[in-house]
Amino acid sequence: MNTFLTLLLNGISLGAIYALIALGFAVIFKASEVVSFMHGSLLLFGAFTIAKLNASIGFFPAFVVGVLATAGVGLLVERLLINRLRGAPVISLAILTIGIDIMMLTELTRRIGSDILNAGHPWGGDFVRIGGIGITENRLYAMVTAAVLIAVFFTAFKFSSWGVAMRASAEDGETAALMGIKLGRVSALAWVIGAGLAAVAGLFLVGSPTPGVAPGVHSVALRAFPAAILGGLDSTGGALVGGMIIGIAEAMASGYQDQLLFLGRGFGDVVPYVVMILVLLVRPSGLFGTKELTRV
Amino acid sequence: MSDTATVGEQLAPAASATPPTRRSGLLSVRTLLLLVALVLLLVTPIYVEEFWLRTGFAVFGAIIGAIGLNLLVGTTGQLSLAHAFFLAVGAITYVYVSGEPGGTAEAIDGLGLPPLVGMVAGVLLAGVAGLLFSPVAARLRGIYLGVASLGLVFIGQHVLNTYTSVTGGFNGRTAPEFSLFGFTFGSTDPDLFVLGVDFGEAERLWYLGLVLALAAYVFAKNLLRSRPGRALQTLRDSEVAAAVMGVDVQGYKARVFLVSSMYAGLAGVLYALSIGSVAPESFALDLSVLYLAMIVLGGLGSIGGAALGALFVTALPLVFQEYAGSLPFVNEPGQGGVSAGQAARLLFGLAIVLVVLFEPAGLVGLGKRITGLFRRKPRTTSS
């Protein structure tokens, strides 16, 4: 029972990190119709910046700079590229982000080399025990931070003028523009938020039990894709639920690896994709995604 | 503009939309150029050294794969990132069916059948894999399909890494040499001299690749001109319109997946032959992305474009590697700085961004623009 609860808690904390990334996907998709295939690189960029600056300016300043720099990259991409292509087919825009991802990942991989950088979290990899249930400190902080960020996000999304503008423009872009909503600004802010969230997620993703900043983190970030798709790409709530489902499923599959040996070693890594395909077979637009209507 | 909010939208129609202009009588300049190119390709092995022939063989394989992916993504508008998986199925089926059992550390199975059987089995099995995925593909549209197919790559990698007796596991296994009715492509048996040039493995494989790539090219060209080809293009432009015209939407989607993955299977077999061994590692998401890069750079929907893109994406890193010493900014591996492979990747990334921004019809579109500069403007207004 304790094993189960431990795995559940670890799954939730992993799910919280995935939810942060997936939330970024969803916000960006809602505001600019772009499926960002470059999120893995953004995340790696954030973690890399933090790890590099940490030695010279200390952890918390490095953290702030890292998140801001990543958000800056997001803003740059939106202003320079995405904004020029408003109304282009979704697939072209997705391919564009793949192009950026290739460049960023190549450069980051080159800079990281074969080292594993330490992000230098002030909290270590110690286990915290809550009555027989164990979780690393890093994951615990991840959970708390994610909860706070997600709460702030949903409050802003519901009540702030940006949130209203964003929901309006996602609902009907043309009408929103006619009502005086600046679509460009909405989309730029969405990219800043999405990239910033990715950097925060990146910081926790490279902490224990993961060894540190290495190019492999990029593929871990890709697992947040199933989370976003599972919940429905245009649903922020869905991103949250999807993140949790994927996180728990992955933690369970890795934890009960020995019982699942007939599925092969390391099955936990592919569980997100299996779950995603199964859900999509039943609900092609994800759990909470807007159903596509075809007008004839 | 009620449909701007829908998730699945069509790709920008590329060069394929232009109707073929037929001139009766004499050969057109275009056909003549193609013939000259063909003759040049045929005599290449006599004059060119081995490195270029080996690069050429890799390019021929990539051309086949790229044409297949282009049929799916460019012509039919179904975004797929699963191409690497179908390549893997083709390549590994080939080494399993034609390879001998063996292995030192771990037992590796193999059927030891003739390589031709292995090649055909690889193509067919890749097609079956495509058909198996098509129920998923039929239900999903646009970007959802793209991400679902992304999952297929990871699941496929896991499966391949698990069945070590077939795939050789992490380290992979060597690919058996190709032979056709007793004529081997790997060694010098029987010896063959053409115009005093010893036709060894590289020369023989060059012709194998050339023939297969040409066949793939002609088949795709004809497919696009035929009734199913028109149906696929209508599917891309509007599924509703296609259904109204009597096109069996789900049926055609399944069939284009079948054809595309068979192309991928053949490309996988050639890949195995060109590298000489296969490991599941080689068929990661990277490879899918490279294939996507090929067709985007070449021009979505254009068969010739796919071939051009394949040439560019496959040959560039190899050429960079060969001439790393004499290129500025590029260093030999292990010296720090930008290595050849990395330089090539940076270039692809940049090229993709530029193509999407400025020339959605890719290299083919660029070529058309350039030739358009020299052509007389058509009389648009009759004054």
Image: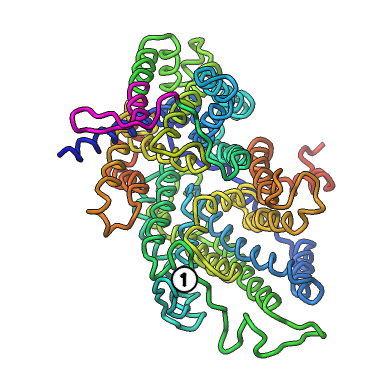
Give residue B237's position: percent from left, percent from top.
51, 44
Q: Where are the magenta residues, as a range?
A: A122-145
**Chain label for disc 1:** B
Give residue B335's position: percent from left, percent from top.
71, 48
Residue B110 versus residue B188 in the image, above or below? above
Give residue B228's position: percent from left, percent from top.
49, 60
Give residue A155's position: percent from left, percent from top.
35, 13
B270 within the magenta span: no
Q: Residue A279: which quarter of the image?
A: top left
Residue B22 versus residue A141 in the image, above or below? below
- A107 and A176: which one is in front? A107
- B83 and A260: which one is in front? A260
- Identify the image quadrant of the C terminus of chain B: top right
Q: Is residue A185 left or right of residue A258?
A: right
Residue at 53%, 14% (x, y): give it.
A182
- A277 and A126: which one is in front? A126
User: Which residue corresponds to mark 1?
Assistant: B122
Q: Is residue B29 left or right of residue B210?
A: right
Q: Is residue A89 left or right of residue A141?
A: right
Residue B198 versus residue B63 in the image, above or below? below
Residue at 58%, 57% (x, y): give it.
B66
Amino acid type at image mark 1: Gly
Q: Residue B113: which quarter of the image?
A: bottom left
Query: Count the marks: how many?
Result: 1
